[in-house]
Amino acid sequence: MESCIVSTTDGVCLQARIFKPPQETTQYGSLGTAIVLVHPYSKLGGCQGLMQGIALRLAIKGFITVTFDMRGVGRSTGRCSLTGFAETQDVIAVCRWVSQNLPDKKIMLVGSSAGAPIAGSAVDQVEEVIGYTSIGYPFGLAASVLFGRHHKAILRSRKPKFFIMGTKDEFTSVAQLENKLKSAAGRVQAHLILGVSHFEVEGPAYDARMADLIVGFAASLTL
């Protein structure tokens, strides 16, 4: 793991970590795709440390993986926002840094919880992003008060999209997810985990399963 600082266009400095595959790992390294992980809601304690378990597993499987603290979190400067639109600029900055500084030029964006709508709004703003995965996207009515204006960006994008959710998610029902995905453009996949809640899916007990699902989707983008 290496640390670095990424600067945004509005002068925020983001603390980021790069997880590199072991030298002997070649299973997915030839795909040329880096994975950028976007952490849950900053105002509820979201930080890049919550994504470390997934990042480590993705690196072991051969993917260069990047996590970062969004503005106002940890040692990143700036102030976090309520709706996540300022944080979308953080995602864009990190993706552009990855494409300019790391050997893998293609990027898959992965957002967890509130990080999912934030990442989704960045997908079509970075040419190098070839796909998107959400873990527990908060499509429900209550969460939409904060994040509803992000929905159109990812649903209208024609880039491949993969939505992972527990069937007991407290913020989005299965029916709400299915209804939203009916209007989605391009290739869309969903994976439901039976009997699992929102916070369980984004918790460390499911890091290995999340990594396996992300790897499967990333590999399918090159077929």
Image (cartoon, rainbow, N blue to C red):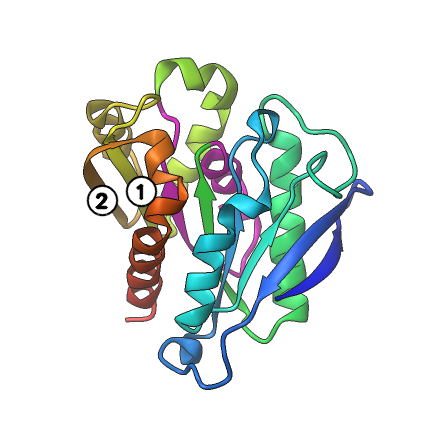
Badge 1 is on which residue?
163
Which label was assigned to residue 138? none
Magenta range is 114-139
Mark 1 closeness class: few <14, some 14–19, many ≥20 residues within 10 Å: many
Which image quarter: residue 136?
top left
Which quadrant is home to the N terminus?
bottom right
- Check disc 2 and report its element: helix, strand or loop: strand
The answer to whether any part of residue 108 appears in the image is no
Place of residue 37 in the rendered image (x, y in percent of width and height, measured from the top left): 51, 51
Place of residue 62 in the rendered image (x, y in percent of width and height, measured from the top left): 43, 74
The answer to whether any part of residue 166 appears in the image is yes
- N-term mark: 1 or 2: 1
Place of residue 196 in the rendered image (x, y in percent of width and height, measured from the top left): 24, 33
Which label was assigned to residue 191? 2
Q: What separation in Å lies between label 1 and label 2 (alpha carbons)?
A: 6 Å
Residue found at the very far front of the displayed protein:
205
Residue found at the very far bottom of the displayed protein:
24
Q: Amino acid at mark 2?
A: His
Place of residue 88 in the rendered image (x, y in percent of width and height, measured from the top left): 60, 38
Which quadrant is home to the C terminus?
bottom left
In depth, the one of 154 and 163 nearer the eye is: 163
Which image quarter: residue 192?
top left
- The answer to whether residue 22 is above or below residue 76 is below
Q: Who's the residue at 38% across and 75% down the image?
A: 28
- The answer to whether residue 146 is above or below residue 71 is above
In this image, 146 relative to 134: left or right? right
Label pair 1/2, CB-CB below 8 angstroms: yes
Residue found at the very far right of the displayed protein:
11
- The answer to whether residue 197 is above or below residue 140 is below
In this image, 202 relative to 36: left or right? left
Q: Is residue 15 magenta?
A: no
